[in-house]
Image (spheres, rainbow, N blue to C red):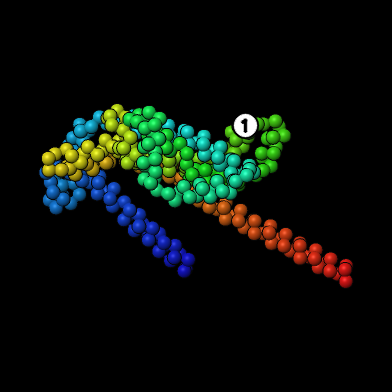
Amino acid sequence: MTEKRAGFGATILTAVVSLIWLLPLIFAVLVSFRPQADGVGSGNIFFGSRITLDNYSAALSVAPWAWHAVTSVIFVVGTLVVQLVTVTMAGYAFARMKFFGRGVLLFILLLQIMIPTAVLLVQNYATIRELGLFDTRWALMLPYWGSAFGVLLLRQTFREVPRELEEAARIDGANLLQILFNVYIPLSIPAYVAFALVSISSHWNEFLWPFIVTRTEEVRPLTVGLNKLYSTTEVGALYGQLLAGTVIVIAPLVILFMLFQRRFIQSFASSGIKWHKSNKMKHRESAREDAEKTEGRGYLSVLCG
């Protein structure tokens, strides 16, 4: 009975917290369908005097959204494709290969996660200028082709793959790429899905770096185009249009998460469970080794006595 009450209380708490997190999104959707002339306190509390799509049509006429959408897709997909290659290679190296300085490099990766991206803006901007890539789509993608989070995630995932599978593949004559594509990658699909969703969402919402390294409209993503809605009139932003543009920009991410949310949650949950199980197995093995050593010392003392 106590467990049922605790479970019911946890469900209610989760629902309340989820509703609090959803309030900004709900507010944005409701205001985007309100007439621009209706104040928040006039008319129906949700949609004002009527439901209208005028804010969406006005927002779509402010900027070349088609070019912005193409740039965002190229930015997100191009970054993710290169990241999948780099994090796979680095994750396997840290999980299975033994080389000098592996622990130091792993520690540097952990430090990189704790460093805010904005700290490296000046250095990255200077590098892009030196390479002659300013105001190009290559400039958007280049700083994100490596991911410390992805390397650490795949390192932990690859460590859970039984070594016997790799050894059997090597006996059959498989090289490193064949082992990765036939052994490690198929068994790590949930981790790849989780990483892909994190990468897509973070780069789709990226604003500061694209705003700095681009000037022409054709190479600017949706988030930078959304900035135009702040100055649509002399008195400032029209918030109905602004929130309509915001809904347009975030809609693909919401749909993507709704389609893959189960696998996204399961991947992180399974990674945590595997990590906990691996730690328990290590503790058991170390305890067994200590017991065997103690037992061996006891026999040795009896023989010597």
Q: Residue at x 45, y 36 (%)?
A: 145
Amino acid type, label 1:
Gln
Q: Is residue 48 left or right of residue 224?
A: left
Q: Give the quadrant of residue 183.
A: top right
Residue 78 vertical placement versus 149 (above, below): above
Within 10 Å of disc 1 (Cα), the crowding (few <14, some 14-19, many 20+) is: few
Q: Can you give x and y, in whole percent of width and height, for residue 151 in the image?
A: 52, 43
- Residue holding disc 1: 178
Q: Position of residue 131 (x, y in %)?
A: 40, 30
Q: Considering the numbered disc 1 on the image, is that residue within a helix, a strand or a loop?
A: helix
Query: Is residue 255 among what the camera can see?
Result: no
Residue positioned 59% across, 41% down in the render? 93
Closer to the camera in the image, 103 or 198: 103
The C terminus is located in which quarter?
Answer: bottom right
- Left or right of 173? Residue 71 is left
Rendered location of residue 66, percent (x, y): 29, 29
Taking depth in this image into account, of 304 and 121 the one nearest to the observer is: 121
Left or right: residue 131 compared with residue 42: right
Please name the residue shown 60% across and 32% down the image: 177
